[in-house]
Image (cartoon, helix red, strand yellow):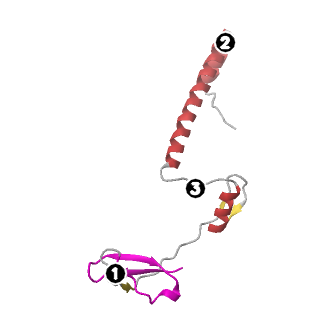
Amino acid sequence: MPMYSYRCGACGAAQDVFKAIKDLDLAEPCARCGTVMTRQICAPTVRGDYPGYACPITGNWIEGRRAHEENLRKHNCRVYEAGELDDHKAQRAAEDAAFDRSIEATVEEFVEKLPARKREQLAVELENGADVGVVRA
C-alpha cells in the first residue's frame, strides 16, 4: 500500500498516510485541528534489498530480505536490537580476557612443576629467540 504525504494549510501539521490507490482522492482530516489537508508531492522512498551473506549457522547463502526473514524463523533467531551487539562484543571480550588469564596461570603452574633442568633449557630457548604462543582452535 502506498504512502502519501499531507500538510495542513491551517496549522502546518504534516502527516504521512498509508492508503490504497483507490482511496487516493478521499479527503484526509488533520489529526491536530481537523481541517482537510492537501496532498504533497514527495520523492518516493525505495527500500533496497539486503545484500547476500552466508548464514552463520549453516553456511548456506542467503540472498534478499525474504530469504533473510525465512532463515531467521527457520533457526528461531532474531536481529540484534540497538546496542545489543555492542553488549555482546563487550561480554565476549571480558570472557576472552578471563580465559587468557586462566591459560597464563595454567602455563605458569606447568612451568613451576618442570624439573629444574627443563626450566633452564626452556629459559635458554626463549632467550635465543624461540617463539611461544597460544593458538585457539
Q: Earlier in the sequence, mark 3 or mark 1?
A: 1
Rendered residue at 44%/88% (across/down): 26
Residue 111 appears at what percent x and percent y? 64, 17
Rendered residue at 47%/80% (across/down): 44
Query: The residue under label 2 is which amino acid type?
Result: Lys
Residue extending farthest to the front is 34
Dot in front, 3 or 2: 3
Q: Which mark is residue 21?
A: none
Helix, strand or loop at label 1? It is: strand
Picture quarter containing residue 5? bottom left
Magenta region: which residues? Answer: 1-30
Query: The residue under label 1 is which amino acid type?
Result: Arg
Residue extending farthest to the top is 116
Residue 101 appears at what percent x and percent y? 56, 27
Q: Which mark is residue 79?
A: 3
Residue 136 appears at what percent x and percent y? 67, 36
Q: Earlier in the sequence, mark 2 or mark 1?
A: 1
Spatial CA distance of label 3 from label 2 is 49 Å
From the image, tell me which residue sits under label 2: 113
Rendered residue at 52%/88% (across/down): 22
Picture quarter containing residue 110? top right
Q: How busy is the neighbourhood of tag 3: few (under 14 within 10 Å), some, or many (20 plus)?
A: few
Q: Is residue 91 left or right of residue 39?
A: right
Picture quarter containing residue 41? bottom left
From the image, tell me which residue sits under label 1: 7
Spatial CA distance of label 2 from label 1 is 80 Å
